[in-house]
Image (cartoon, helix red, strand yellow):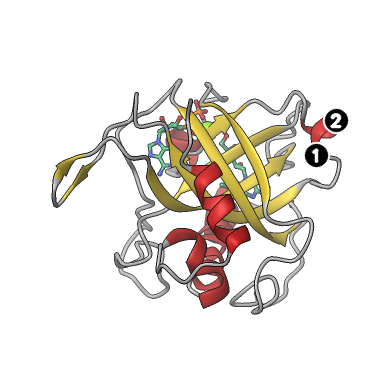
Amino acid sequence: MRPDKPREPVAGPDAGPEPPYPVRLSGPVIKGFGRGSKDLGIPTANIPADDLSEKHPELTTGVYYGIVALDPKTYQHETSEGSTSTAVVLPAVLSIGYNPFYKNTVRSVEIHIMPALTEPSPTAAGQEGQTKFNRLPDFYQTRLNLLILGYIRPEFDYVSLEALVEDIRVDCEVARESLLREAYKCYLVDSGKASGKVSEDREWLVSFD
Ligand SMILES: Cc1cc2nc3c(=O)[nH]c(=O)nc-3n(C[C@H](O)[C@H](O)[C@H](O)COP(=O)(O)O)c2cc1C
Ligand SMILES: Nc1ncnc2c1ncn2[C@@H]1O[C@H](COP(=O)(O)OP(=O)(O)O)[C@@H](O)[C@H]1O
Ligand SMILES: [Mg+2]
């Protein structure tokens, strides 16, 4: 069960991702159990987890933050210049594991894509009414690249659905605050000052051959 402790506002070192991060994952967006949007009001893009233990033994079950890119061949997005052929890059929070609240028997990778850091956060504390999580037009089967930049917490079971949703809301805020730090923001926003390694990771993120 989730321990009754206050949450830290950021996760991971301020100086930037430390090994094993950034970790690269990719895959087509597949169907999950259909609970994300329906039960929780939190859509999560699921990607296959079949070869995770073999390829990424370092990824323990838990909640992580990072950035995602969607293949522009099947996911078009509008910018101020109209629609574009470059991949959209957005912040994300994800869970890797068995969802103890639902007692799944297979591991899943579930990614909730958040609005750009320049947009107001829909999950900020103190908003009126029920939290409205970010929602994009559906993009099943689209290829997704993910750069995991840090670990937030283990997965827990919860006393109620509301308690699970509230913890995921806080995860979104922790991810956002963590990514707003300069040594992480450089992965999302090309300032022209990024180091060779950061540029290499960014290039990998947006390449879909
Ligand atoms: C950031 C984040 C954190 C999560 N943490 C937990 C958790 O601690 N325990 C849990 O049982 N499920 C957790 N989940 C998983 C949700 O229960 C899951 O997204 C939901 O079951 C939807 O599954 P579906 O994509 O198969 O429909 C988390 C999901 C996200 C996006
Ligand atoms: N912000 C978002 N983050 C992730 N997926 C989103 C988002 N907005 C819309 N989606 C869409 O919703 C789908 C996931 O919804 P969900 O209810 O979790 O269903 P499933 O159980 O099939 O994963 C994604 O595959 C994607 O097409
Ligand atoms: Mg899902």
Above or below, comparing residue 128 to residue 101 in the picture:
below
Residue 18, position as x, y percentages in the image = 75, 66
| Secondary structure of residue under mark 1 | loop
Residue 162 showing in the rendered view: no
Q: Total of numbered circles in the picture? A: 2
| Secondary structure of residue under mark 2 | helix
**Residue drawn 27% across the image and 33% down it:** 76
Residue corresponding to mark 1: 56
* Left or right of 21 on screen, residue 84: left
Residue 161 showing in the rendered view: yes
**Residue drawn 38% across the image and 75% down it:** 126
Q: Nearer the viewer, residue 186 or 74?
A: 186
Residue type, label 2: Glu
Above or below, comparing residue 93 to residue 171 in the picture:
above
Q: Nearer the viewer, residue 41 or 163?
A: 41
Mark drawn on residue 54? 2
Residue 41, position as x, y percentages in the image = 42, 43
Mark drawn on residue 126? none
**Residue drawn 65% across the image and 43% down it:** 24
Residue 32 position by quadrant:
top right
Residue 69, position as x, y percentages in the image = 45, 42
Q: Nearer the viewer, residue 187 or 62?
A: 187
